[in-house]
Structures are given as C-alpha cells and as structure tokens.
Amino acid sequence: MTTTTTDVDLDITGMTCASCATRVERKLNKLPGVAATVNFATEKARVHAESPVPLEELISAVEQAGYGASVPAPPATEAPDEQATVPRDAELVSLRQRLIVSTVLAVPVAVLSMIPVLQFTYWQWLTLTLAAPVVVWGAWPFHRAAAINARHGAATMDTLISLGVLAAFGWSLYALFFGGAGMPGMRMSVTFVGTPQSGGHEVYLEVAALVTVFILLGRYLETRAKRQSGEALRALLELGAKDAVVLRTGSEQRVPVAQLVPGDIVVVRPGEKIPADGVVTEGVSAVDESMLTGESVPVEVAPGSKVVGATVNTGGRLLVELTRVGADTELARMARLVEEAQTGKAQVQRLADRVSAIFVPIVIALAIVAFTVWLLVGASPEVAFTAAVTTLIIACPCALGLATPTALLVGTGRGAQLGILIRGPQVLEQTRRIDTVVLDKTGTITAGTMTVTATHPAAGTDETELVQVAGALEHGSEHPIGRAITNAASGPLAAVESFAAVAGQGVQGIVDGRLVAAGRASWITTQWALPIPAELADTIAADEAAGATVTVVAWDGQVRGAISVADTIKPTSREAVTRLRELGLTPILLTGDNPGAARAIANQAGIEDVRAGVTPQGKLDTIRDLQAAGRVVAMVGDGVNDAAALAAADLGIAMGTGTDAAITAADLTIVSGDLMLVPDAIRLARRTLGTIKGNLFWAFAYNVAAIPVAMLALLNPILAAAAMAFSSVFVVTNSLRLRRFRPLPTPTRAGAPATREPAPVQA
C-alpha cells in the first residue's frame, strides 16, 4: 500500500515580526499530522504531512491566524516581465514613502521639543499638527497589525510598538487639552532620563514621532536586507539560458528552454550558454563552468563529455544531446538546495521564536506593573508614564526574527556563488561540533580516472614505441586501464587486426603485422610462456606494492616492457587535508581499494589513519564505530557506495561531480568536486553560525538588560526607540558582512591562478 504525503510551500503575507511567524507556524501545526516551518525572512511556510491535506485547509488555517497565504506562482516560461517584480517591491516602496514623509514631519517636532530657545508661543500646538500624521499614517502598519492580533487574542512586537506610540500621543493630548502643557509660554527639554514634573506639563509628541521614524527606519532596512540577501538565489535562478537552437528535421529552430525535452539535439555556438544538461555529440571546445562551480579555468570537452546547463561555450561549435531539462537540471537542483536551506530554521532560532512568543505578554505586564508601582509610591503620573512607555519600547526585540534568517540567506547565497551548497540550517550547528573527517579515496582525494604513472621499457625497447604499440592495441578496449594507456599515446595510432580480450587477464591483436599481447604479468608468463626479466619483475612488484596496476607488453616472442596505471591524487588534495587539520579535524582515509594503493595515496595526501578494503556496509560500520567512540564525524564522498555513510555521518559532504545518491544523502555539496572547497565550506558554515549567535545576542540580550532601567524611569523613550531600531540595523549589517567571505587562496602552481574566487554573479 502506497502512502500519500503532502509537501507544499506557501507564500505568507502580513507577517511583521518573529512572533507572527511563530503564530502561523503554531496554527498550521495544530492541524492533524501537519509539521510546518515558517520563515519570517523568506516569508514562506514549508508544510509536510504524512497524509493528504487539502490546500484550502492550510490556507484557511493561516487566514484564521490573521495572515494571508497563497501557493507560489510557477516559474515563468518566458522572459521575465518587469511587472512581476512590482508586488515584491511595493512593500519596500511603501515603507520608504512612510519613512521619508514621517522623517520630514518628525524632525521639526524633535527640534522644537529639545531646544527651548526655539520654542515660541504655542509651539506645542504646531508640533501636535506635525506629529499627528506621523502617529496615525506613518505608524499605521503597526496599528493595523496590532488590531489584527488583538482580534485573535494575540500580541506581537507590533503590539508593543503601537501601544508605546499611542500611549505617548494619548498622554500628549491629555496634557495639551486637560493639563498645563497647552498654556502659552510652555517650555520643555529632552534629557537622557525622564523629566518628572507634577501634572501634565509636558508633551511626548517627539517620543511618538521619533519612535515611529526609528522603527520605520529599522523595518525599511530589514526589508531591503531581505531583498539583497536573496539576490544570490535569484541570480542563480537567472543564470540559465532563456532559449536554445534545436536541430529538428534537419533545420535549426530557436525555441524557449521550457519547450526542450530529453533527447533534443541543441546547437551551442561560441559565447552562448548551454541550455540544459547533456552530452556532447559533435565538436571540441572549452566550457566555462565558473558560474556554477566557482572554477575560473575552462574545462575541455569533446564528443562524449557531459556538460551542465547555464555554463558558457567559449570555443568551437558544439552539438549537445540533452539528458536533463527543466527541474531536473543541475542548476535547478542547486537552486532547490539553496532555497530549502534558506527556508529552514536552525535550532537556535526555534528557541528564539519560542521566547518571543511569550515575551510580548510579559513585557506588557511589566509595563503595567511599572506604571502602577510608580503611582502607588507617590510619583507623578509623568514618571509612571515614562517608565511604562519606555519599558514597552526598549523591550521590543524587533530584530529577533531576522537574526537567524538574514544571516542564513546571506551565508547560503554566498556559498552558492562559490559552488558550496548548504542543505539546511541544522548543518551549521553540526559544523561547529565535528572533530573527525572521513575521506573517501576514489573521486574525492583522487581524480577517479586511471592515468599512466610510469613506463618501464625492457632493454633494447624504445619507450615511445612501447607506449604507441600498447596504445594502438588498447584502443579497441573499453577497460579504464586500456583507455588510460591509449590516452598516453601520442600521434596517430596504428590499426589493430584480430583484436581479442580475455576478461580479467589482458588483450591481444596484430599491430603493424606483429602479434602483440598486453595484460597481467601472470597471464603473459603462463598463457604466452614468456619470461619477464628479473630487473623488470622487481620494478613491477614495487609499482604494484605502491598501489598501481601494471600492464606487461610483449611482441615478437619477447616481453618489451611494462606500463603502470593508477588513480592519481588531485593536485589540491594534500593542501586541503592540511587545512582540515588546521580547523581542528582529524582526517581518516576510508576506501574499498587494496591497502597498498590506499597507503600510497594517503602518504601523498598526508593522512596517517587508513581504513582500506572496506565494503559499503563497512564504511557505514566505520562511521558508527567512530561515533560510538565519542567522535563527531564528517564524511566526504562521491559514490553510491558512500551514500549510506554520508547519511549516517553527523555531517555528510558530497562531491558534486559524483552520483545523485551521494548528493541526496549529504548535508553539504561541493559542486566542483574540488576537495579544497571542503575546508572553505566548513569555514563558511561556522562563520554563518557565529554571525547568527552574535545577531541573537544583540537582538535580544540588551533588551532584557535594559528593562530594569526602563522600569525605574531612568531612560528617555526616544533613546529607547533609537536603541531598539538600531539593533535591527546591526543585525542586518552584521549579516551582510558574510557577502565578503572569501575562500582561502590556492597554492600557486605552474601557470595556475592563485585563487579560486569566481567572477561576481550578476543578478
């Protein structure tokens, strides 16, 4: 029996703070079998249920909480319409207008209230005229949100703001119409602390106006930051080609990429983007993959080479047979991984959300307590009012909801630009804890392809002739060793006649009229009864002990030499292992290869602990054994045989050049497959986590510390508003610093660039 699940993303509207997100999340999670996560920064809800749940029921639940919900619009199949961006920018434009108008009106109010020498007769009534639009129209979003929350029996950060602004304005109206503040010749000044006087002899119009301006400024900067921090993802999504030239019925047709299907043959000319993933069928060129991998050096491609959509053809004309289009492409997969990471929540943010949900009612209660206690001890209403209003304002951690999401947006977006895909926020917390990194060999530390590492001609045999004859013979072989030998030969290869292969032993054929055999030493000595010279035999034994596979070549009834083939270490692997050690990690090599080959590669990479000859189950058992011993383990791999170990590890890191199974099981993906990016990925994740913790501290801790000061009426409400607003500024700017993250430079090699920093991705 098949179980149908529900997985859907919803766009949420009307949220103004972390408390709103918590309310929506709580409302959705009350539905039977529903597990929902609501992200305030991305304004999205991710809903999962083990059973079918009607979409209308989900939307209704959100609306019952006082917010709006809708299914995200499908991606456009044609060129993007400028009008499509208007709704998202409307919020930013509205905030900017409110901020500008409110600032223009509030500045004269503040100046007149703070500088007695400028206070003319009846100046206070002018400030009332200027402040009223700010309080009513400028702060309208906060009043509206507070009213909606009140109807649903809830209180959020907007409730604190609205209460504080209305309380200051209401007190001012009382003082002007019923107290002594409206009398001619009234003078006042603003200090760092409240100015206790008897009766209503002072107005708080500057408090109401400036609190509104400061908070609008904070909200505007927050909204703009959310737009900026999502630029990396939007740029990633826009990298792909908009149309393609398809060969159909012998003629070229230009069609939108949405109309492409697997099997189509597309023409890619120099300077054009490859429209989707595929295989080159005709042409030789170099492809710039820097937009996806961060690697600046173009990759040479020929017939049979795999290419990825959104990369740029820099050389000759290519014909590409498409294998994956639309949502199945590498680019789409990268975008999904980034969006999933940005939509999730770190554990530390969940704690902050729970705190914020109960924080607002507590603050309101504390403000009431402060007001009541001051009146009971005989203080003036002004003192009591100052304490209450200041408590409401200073305790509002408006930046709390952006502390984690903004940093996560910027960090994951920067990672995507560098070819580092972070699957989710929980990954950040794991990178801080790991102390051991287990590395697969083939395809991770090594190139994953066989290469000729040494040639050993016998006495009287020319080395070039040895390689050419062996290469010509092996040209008919599909074995990786045969292909490596063929690739090592230079120039045109002679034709082969009567080619035959003996499985697991070697190949034979006639090259230039000579019967040639190439294969295992044991096969040459037994099947062909040809002795191997003692000196050559010693060399073969030494190469095999070092992990190489040796092919013995013979013709004309004599052994002519041997060719050693091995999987070679990537140029950057040793430096990558060194940097992993510098991060406090202990490297372990884990491979299914023989001990000799494993030890040889480990020595080149600088790894001491080697676990060789293990099966896929053995890799999984090794990870579990290390965890049982108290280690927190990261696993780096690329193959299907690594998938179980990647999933079981505390942190799974997959090479993007490997299999889909490995990538799916991992927490981090290195798109380029360069091991040097693994320490950079860990550094980026740790820095993002550090930024989140700093944001949370400054977004929340100072509020709690300042509450006693506010309740003692020792803080002016204006300063409280400024401090609260600029906490948002700090959180935003601190998060945006992650955009400056740079990978460590690669050691300079012959003609190679000294850094892997890609060209900036343009949105």
Image (cartoon, rainbow, N blue to C red):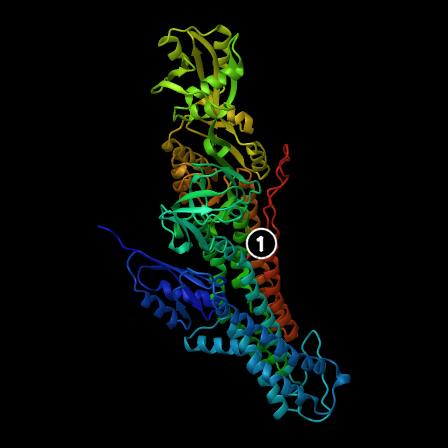
The secondary structure type at the circle numbered 1 is helix
Q: Quadrant of the C terminus?
A: bottom right
Q: Is residue 545 visible?
A: no
Q: Nearer the viewer, residue 476 or 4?
A: 476
Tally the numbered discs.
1
Relative to residue 525, is residue 347 depicted above or below?
below
Give the image quarter of residue 31: bottom left
Percent position of residue 252, x then y: 41, 50
Q: Is residue 493 left or right of residue 583?
A: left
Q: Nearer the viewer, residue 592 or 352?
A: 592
Q: Residue at x 67, y 88 (%)?
A: 126
Percent position of residue 672, x then y: 51, 41
Counting other residues with Cα less than 10 Å from the Cα at mark 1, is it few (<14), some (14-19), or many (20 or more)?
A: many
Q: Residue at x 47, y 44 (%)?
A: 669
Give the image quarter of residue 67: bottom left
Percent position of residue 596, x then y: 47, 21
Q: Nearer the viewer, residue 542 or 454?
A: 454
Percent position of residue 756, x then y: 59, 42
Q: Is residue 174 visible?
A: yes
The residue under label 1 is which amino acid type?
Thr
What is the residue that sits farthest to the left in this orientation? 1
What is the residue that sits farthest to the front in this orientation? 250
Q: Is residue 120 left or right of residue 726?
A: right
Relative to residue 610, is residue 459 depicted above or below?
above
- Which residue has dot 1 on it? 691
Relative to residue 99, is residue 465 depicted above or below?
above
Relative to residue 350, is residue 139 depicted above or below?
below
Give the image quarter of residue 380: bottom right
